[in-house]
Amino acid sequence: ERRITANEFLRMDLPEHEKWELIEGELVLAPSPDMPHQIIALELSTLLRTWLRENPIAIVVPDWDVKFELDEIRRPDLVVALKKGSRLRLGNHGDGTPDFLVEILSPGQGHRELIEKRALYEKYGVSEYCVVDYRKRRIHQFLPGLDGRYLETTIARGTIKSRLLAGFSFRLKDLFRVL
């Protein structure tokens, strides 16, 4: 089977209500997120947007196509791009490397977010990557070490702080209270 390029993917007329990604040149349909996933995405987006109104150093875009290379397009739950110094070019889709990404675990998708996407985002040098596990009420935070490889911290209580967005933090109980 012929591989699809990112440019071909971006010209396709795929249903907007479906979450398609291009993984190594192959079209992949992700399962529809459940209601808790969507509620957490909205709540986290609101926390970020509220903080960014007072600290306008970045923009946050939910559920947005990001082109990493010729045959790789992913659609993270939240994409954060710094206004200065970002390697992500903004347009109808993101092109390049986002500064900060958030994925929310959906049932049966843990391996994808914690292993596959972690490796991809690490490879391209995403500065901060968080995986929200709302069922276990915890967040996996991945930050690059001195060698560029991600160091993982799992936060199950207390406050999570962003290294990239200095000053942005929130209490986990505030995020998960909406459930």
Image: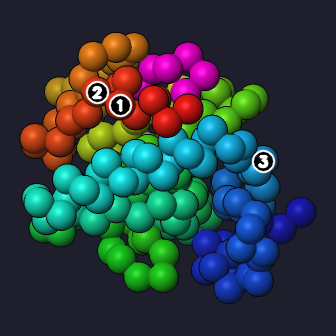
Residue occupying image coordinates x 78% and y 47%: 31
- Given the image, on which type of amino acid does mark 1 rest? Asp
Query: Element type at marker 3?
Result: loop
Residue assigned mark 2: 171
Q: Nearer the viewer, mark 3 or mark 1?
A: 1
The local crowd at label 1, few if under 14, some if 14 to 19, many if 20 or more residues have their Cα within 10 Å, is few
Residue 18 position (above or below residue 100): below
Q: Give the numbered dot on residue 174.
A: 1
Query: Element type at marker 1?
Result: helix
Asked whether residue 96 is drawn in magenta, I would say no
Hey, which quadrant is residue 60 in on the image? Answer: bottom left
Q: Is residue 131 left or right of residue 98?
A: right
Residue 86 position (above or below residue 39): below
* Range shown magenta: 134-140
Q: Looking at the image, can residue 144 be seen? A: no
Asked whether 29 or 68 is in front, the reply is: 29
Image quadrant in which the C terminus is located: top right
Residue lying furthest front: 178
Residue 122 screen position, x and y as percent: 39, 38
The local crowd at label 3, few if under 14, some if 14 to 19, many if 20 or more residues have their Cα within 10 Å, is few
Q: Is residue 105 left or right of residue 58?
A: right
Residue occupying image coordinates x 17% and y 27%: 146
Q: CA distance from mark 2 to mark 3?
A: 29 Å
Asked whether 70 or 28 is in front, the reply is: 28
Residue assigned mark 3: 31
- Please report whichever mark, 2 or 3, sits nearer to the chain's N-terminal start: 3
Residue 57 screen position, x and y as percent: 14, 62
- Given the image, on which type of amino acid does mark 2 rest? Arg
Asked whether residue 135 is drawn in magenta, I would say yes
Query: Marks 1 and 2: CB-CB under 8 Å?
Result: yes
Hey, which quadrant is residue 175 in on the image? Answer: top left
Residue occupying image coordinates x 10% and y 41%: 167
